[in-house]
Image (tube, grey):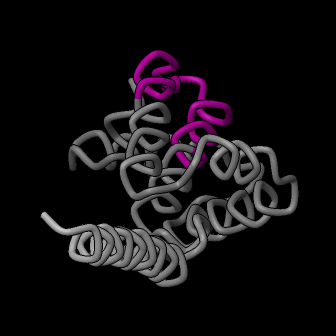
Amino acid sequence: MKAGRRRKLTSIRAYLAAVAVLFGFIVIAGATAARAELRDERQITEGLIATAIAYEIGDKCDSLDARLVAGVNYLWSLRRLASELGYSDAEIDAYVDDRAEQRRLEAIARDRLRRMGAIEGQWETYCTIGRAEIAGDSRIGRLLR
């Protein structure tokens, strides 16, 4: 093969390699840009809210308890889901450790409990909700016993 032709082939390969790398960056950047913030991932936030509601019911109702092992396992499954959705460990840790986000989710959980019929100080209302959730085999119910 002539030297000129070899240089052309090398140049074309280098060009194609550069295009492939650039394309990879564009795909990654596009996927990252299109991905929602972790707090906007409905399945994650709804799971955290359900867990908070179950914990609150277990805390307020003497006849029901939160299933701690089941709760921890469920929280780990939410973490795995976030990872599968493309969030890094650092992003997940930042979200989990965000005090403002914790307060926001707790407020949502307490508001939902009120709408479900829970009345602060009337702890039997929490028990009624908990038993209904267990009977309905809801996510909240599966986190209670």
Q: Residue furthest top?
A: 69
Q: Is residue 69 magenta?
A: yes
Q: Residue furthest front?
A: 2
Q: Position of residue 1 (x, y in %)?
A: 12, 63
How far across and down, in percent of the image, does residue 20 sit? Answer: 33, 72
Quadrant of the rendered image containing residue 130: top left
Residue 126 in the image: x percent, y percent?
Answer: 56, 47
Residue at (80% x, 44% y) in the render? 97
Q: How many marks?
A: 0
Q: Nearer the viewer, residue 94 or 32?
A: 32
Where 123 falls versus 22 (above or below)?
A: above
Question: Would you say 122 lies left or right of 74 here?
Answer: right
Q: Position of residue 144 (x, y in %)?
A: 42, 30
| Looking at the image, residue 115 lies above or below residue 82 | below
Q: Going 48% across and 73% down the picture, which residue do you hit?
A: 25
Which residue ends up furthest to the right in the rendered image? 99
* Nearer-the-camera pick, 128 or 45: 45
Q: What residue is rendered at 37% in x and 69% in y?
A: 14
In the rendered image, which quarter contains the C terminus?
A: top left
Q: Main secondary structure of the magenta part?
A: helix
Q: Nearer the viewer, residue 35 or 11?
A: 11
Q: Nearer the viewer, residue 75 or 66?
A: 75
Residue visible at 54% across and 82% down in the picture: 33
Q: Which residues are magenta?
A: 52-73
Confirm whether the magenta stretch covers residue 111: no
